[in-house]
Amino acid sequence: MPSYIIIGASRGLGYEWLRHLSRDSENTIVGLVRNPDAVEAKLASDSIRNVNIIKADLTDHKSLSAAVTKTVDLTGGSVDYLIINGVHQDPVGDFLSPTEFIGREELLHDYMVKAIETNVVGVMYGINAYLPLVRKSSVKKITVISTGLADLELALQGNMSFFVTYSAVKAALNMVVAKYSIDLRADGVTIIALSPGLVNQLDV
């Protein structure tokens, strides 16, 4: 009975994973979200019952540790597939080019710090928290959601100066994932950064 942990499962791609994986009653599915009530209501309206929701926040390592403790009771102590989908996005900062931050220094600082806190540090919190459970599995798969916008060649060929902070932070995340891949190779853990393409993240 495979176990799946989705961190950042409240909407868009994360919620769709819950929906898709729930079609197989043999799966043990755990979604980590900041607002469990809203997600549980959405699951109920979609007639999805075989999903477990735990409250946690990528930027709060203590909440992740607590979530791991609850996960052990649900999965029997191991995790086959860890999927980290949580992300910080900003409707203003995401679309700006480097020079459009001129005169907006506080916005640049605040957005970059928040983006790094969630998209890099938070992801490391999530991986490190669940790693002991992943190591106990025979599957040992970790997927971290990245973006094609972090690709240097795509940015240059596509003449895309916008999304500077989001792209830069996700590029940093890709390097972090590469370092984990090297670090965990001897343990038999496979970790990848995955670009899912264009995804509607506006729904619940």
Image (cartoon, grey):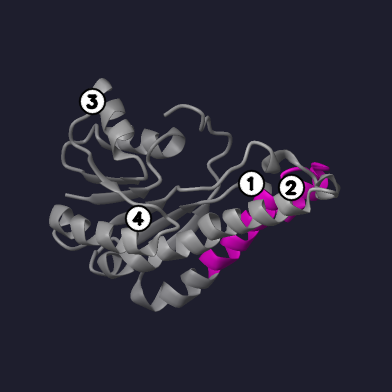
Q: Nearer the viewer, mark 1 or mark 3?
A: 3
For disc 4, the marked residue is 82
Q: Earlier in the sequence, mark 1 or mark 4?
A: 4
Q: Amino acid at mark 3?
A: Ala
For disc 3, the marked residue is 44
Q: Earlier in the sequence, mark 1 or mark 2?
A: 1
The answer to whether the residue labelled 4 contacts the one labelled 2, judged by CB atoms less than 8 Å apart, is no
Instruction: Quote the CA–CA distance across marks 1 and 3.
Output: 33 Å
Which residue appears at 57% of the width and 60% of the height?
173
Instruction: Quote the CA–CA distance across marks 1 and 2.
Output: 7 Å
Q: Is residue 176 located in the magenta-colored stretch of the structure?
A: yes
Label drawn at residue 103: none
Instruction: Quote the CA–CA distance across marks 3 and 4.
Output: 24 Å
Instruction: Quote the CA–CA distance across marks 1 and 4.
Output: 21 Å
Numbered disc 4: secondary structure: strand
Numbered disc 1: secondary structure: helix
Other-residue count near label 1 (Cα within 10 Å), few / some / many at <14 / 14–19 / ≥20: some
Q: Amino acid at mark 4?
A: Leu
Numbered disc 3: secondary structure: helix
Give above or below for 137 relative to 152.
below
The answer to whether the residue labelled 1 contacts the one labelled 2, judged by CB atoms less than 8 Å apart, is yes
Instruction: Judge whether residue 190 can be spotted in this image.
Output: no
For disc 2, the marked residue is 154
For disc 1, the marked residue is 148
Which residue appears at 69% of the width and 43% of the height?
93
Q: Amino acid at mark 2?
A: Leu
Q: Which residues are magenta?
A: 150-178
Q: Amino acid at mark 1?
A: Gly
